[in-house]
Amino acid sequence: MKHLKNAVTLRLDVNKCLGCGRCLEVCPHRVFEADDMKVRIRDRDACMECGACAKNCPLNAIYVKSGVGCATAVIKGWLTGKEPSCGCSDDDCC
C-alpha cells in the first residue's frame, strides 16, 4: 500500500548500517531490502512511519519521525472525509 508520494520522513544512513537486517524483520510494508551486506530502502513511499525500523536499529542508522507524514495524513483524511495531506510545504517536506 502506498500513501502520499514523497511525504515520508524516513532516512537511512548507509554508512552506519551494518546489515543486521532488523529493519527487514520488523517493517510491516517491506520498505527495506538487503543489498550486498547492507540494507537499502526499496520503496520509501510504502513507509507508514510506524517507527519500528528506527527503534530496532542497533546503530541508529535509520531515522523516521513517527506520527507525521503519510500515516497521520491518511488517518486524518479518513476521519475528516478530506483529501489526505502531510501538512508540510514543498520546501519543508521530505
Image (spheres, rainbow, N blue to C red):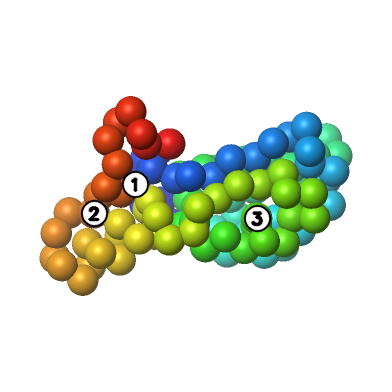
Q: Amino acid at mark 3?
A: Ala
Q: CA distance from mark 1 to mark 2?
A: 8 Å
User: Splitting the image into 4 quarters, where does residue 78 fall?
Assistant: bottom left
Q: Determine the secondary structure under disc 1.
A: loop
Density class for disc 1 (Cα within 10 Å; few <14, some 14-19, many ≥20) is: some
Residue 79 left/right relative to 17: left
- Quadrant (top left/top right/bottom left/bottom right) for the C terminus: top left
As drawn, the residue found furthest toward the left would be 81
- The label shown at residue 4 is 1
Density class for disc 3 (Cα within 10 Å; few <14, some 14-19, many ≥20) is: many
Q: Which residue is mark 2?
A: 84
Q: Amino acid at mark 1?
A: Leu
Residue drawn at x 65%, y 57% is: 53
Give the percent coordinates (x, y) of residue 28.
57, 64
Q: Nearer the viewer, residue 69 or 41?
A: 69
Q: Which residue is mark 3?
A: 54
